[in-house]
Image (tube, helix red, strand yellow):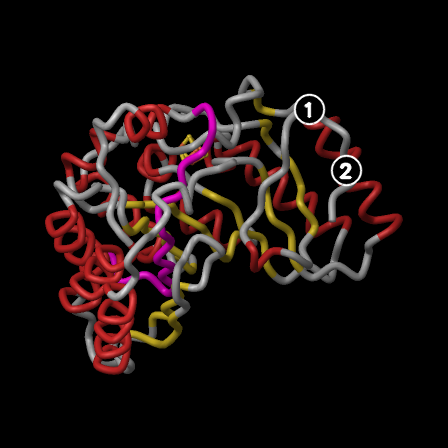
Amino acid sequence: MYFDNAEGPVFRPPSEADSLILRVTIGCSHNACTYCNMYRSVSFRMRPQEEIDAQLQQAQRYAAHIHRVFLGDGNALVLPMERLLAILAQIHALLPKVRRVSCYAGPKDMLRKTPEELISLRQAGLKLVYYGMESGDDAVLAHVNKGVTAAESIEAGQRIVAAGIKLSMMVILGLGGQEASARHARNTALAVSAIRPHMLSALTLMMYRGSELLEEFESGRFPILSPAGIMEELHLLLQDIELPPEHHCLFRSNHISNYINFAGTLPKDKERLLSESLAAKDKLALLKNWDPYNNVER
Ligand code: SF4
């Protein structure tokens, strides 16, 4: 729920369906990933405190029972420390039942915060960060204009985990297309293994109207993977993720973009997930005609 009529679309992770969406920024300050059109229609801005207070006062009036708050929009950690700490303090003052504050975060913003600052944010109530790392491969990251290298991506994720903030990471199957599939899978697995997130979601590439990646696909410059190719990539990814036996990473591949759903805990369920993804690949390989526009926004 949100109490706001500011410009632009509102996005949130599926698991924040019952949260108050507190829009502390509008849009995304990066707004340049070639596969994403989420915030192309709006200019990025940090919202003044009065606009945030107005949303919180409405929430205090109509949703004082709320336990969770999600800070929107695309990368709330871009706000300076003093603004974030003031917002977190105001949330807890006006909504005392709140137990978890979360947000999307971009890698550059995570890296701009020192380890000590991230700890202060956790102590002030930021409990969960959603991070779309998408790939651990330098060439794939450069191709989609993510704005960071794999090493920077890994460091960003590690900083969140080291600060004691829960990290929910997203990666995109198929983001390297046919040419980079195996390398994308292997390097993403290496990055996941180095970061050790608490949650990992493997989405399948969707292409959106107005995005540069869709233009590349439609002009033949970006051949995409078949459904069986996506399953092969998932298999490779899972195969190469190495986490300590005591680690508990909730793994999901059940987004609307995915052909077949998978769920488990890594590393405990790795062998099961490997055999399920292999079986899924064999099943999808039997598809004689698959529609390459299946995952394209109509
Ligand atoms: S994928 Fe995330 S960081 Fe990239 S442009 Fe979209 S909202 Fe911004």
Seen from the viewer's position, the closer of residues 175 and 20 is 175
Q: How far from the left and from the top, in percent, is residue 100?
A: 59, 59
Which residues lie in the magenta part? 195-210
Does residue 209 belong to the magenta stretch? yes
Mark linked to residue 55: 2
Q: Earlier in the sequence, mark 1 or mark 2?
A: 1
Vertical order, 276 against 148 (above or below): below
- Rendered residue at 58%/41% (across/down): 11
Q: Is mark 1 within 8 Å of ligand 1?
A: no
Q: Quadrant of ligand 1?
A: top left
Q: From the viewer's perspective, tell me whether residue 68 is left or right of residue 222.
A: right
Q: How far from the left and from the top, in percent, is residue 218?
A: 32, 27
Question: In which quarter of the view is residue 41 placed?
Answer: top right
Seen from the viewer's position, the closer of residues 116 and 22 is 22
Q: How far from the left and from the top, in percent, is residue 229?
A: 22, 55
Vertical order, 11 against 198 (above or below): above
Seen from the viewer's position, the closer of residues 229 and 11 is 229
Q: Amino acid at mark 1?
A: Glu
Q: Residues within 10 Å of mark 1 (few under 14, many from 20)?
A: few
Mark linked to residue 7: 1
Question: In which quarter of the view is residue 213 placed?
Answer: top left
Does residue 30 belong to the magenta stretch? no
- Rendered residue at 33%/57% (across/down): 161
Mark 1 or mark 2, which is nearer to you? 1
Mark 2: which secondary structure? helix
Q: Residues within 10 Å of mark 2 (few under 14, many from 20)?
A: many
Q: Amino acid at mark 2?
A: Gln
- Rendered residue at 66%/23% (across/down): 48
Total numbered labels: 2
The residues bearing labels 1 and 2 have C-alpha atoms spaced at a distance of 14 Å
Mark 1: which secondary structure? loop
Q: From the viewer's perspective, tell me whether residue 116 is left or right of residue 282.
A: right
